[in-house]
Amino acid sequence: MQIIAYGAAPASANPEKTLQIANDADINALVASGALEGVERVELHFPKFTDGRAYTQAVLLRRRHRFAGDIRATGDVLIDQLVHMQRSGFSSAVLAEGVDASAAQSQFERFGAFYQGDALEQRPLFARQETV
């Protein structure tokens, strides 16, 4: 997962290929309307760290609609959320103001594997392991 410090997010080279989606938007309706055609990055917003609707949107985009582009978390993004964001399908995150980006990477080093499947790898750990 790409971690971006607050204020360091580069402007998109192709803003017309970036879609910002409100956390109360219906992903299924957006896909049905063709809003994702030609989109390379979707930005999902967390207005507060306690509002988790963007997690569901990311899972729907990755699993149900097979979106292969960048899904970026924006808004009130804290270090504690990053691992779950990655498992939900996010590929990049812009940290909230005041959050130390250098400490963010350590979250991924703390957890080596997960038993359950996730948005990117749906098989549980036992199904991924080779038999001896």
Image (spheres, rainbow, N blue to C red):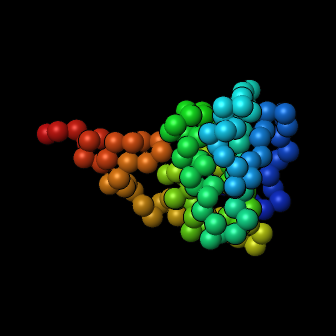
In the visual, does 60 lie left or right of 22? left
Above or below: residue 53 compared with residue 70: below
In the visual, does 85 lie left or right of 119? right
Q: Residue at x 38, y 48 (%)?
A: 117
**Which of the 4 image quadrants contains residue 114?**
bottom left
x then y, percent, for residue 24: 69, 55
x then y, percent, for residue 111: 42, 61
Residue lying furthest top:
38
Quadrant (top left/top right/bottom left/bottom right) for the C terminus: top left
For the residue pair 118 and 132, the one nearer the viewer reads as 118
Q: Residue at x 63, y 55 (%)?
A: 54
Q: Residue at x 62, y 71 (%)?
A: 50
Q: Residue at x 48, y 60 (%)?
A: 109
For the residue pair 109 and 66, the one nearer the viewer reads as 66
Residue 53 visible in this rendered orientation of the protein: yes
Numbered circles on residues, count: 0
x then y, percent, for residue 25: 70, 49
Residue 103 visible in this rendered orientation of the protein: no
In the visual, does 125 lie left or right of 63? left
Above or below: residue 103 compared with residue 123: below
x then y, percent, for residue 113: 37, 54
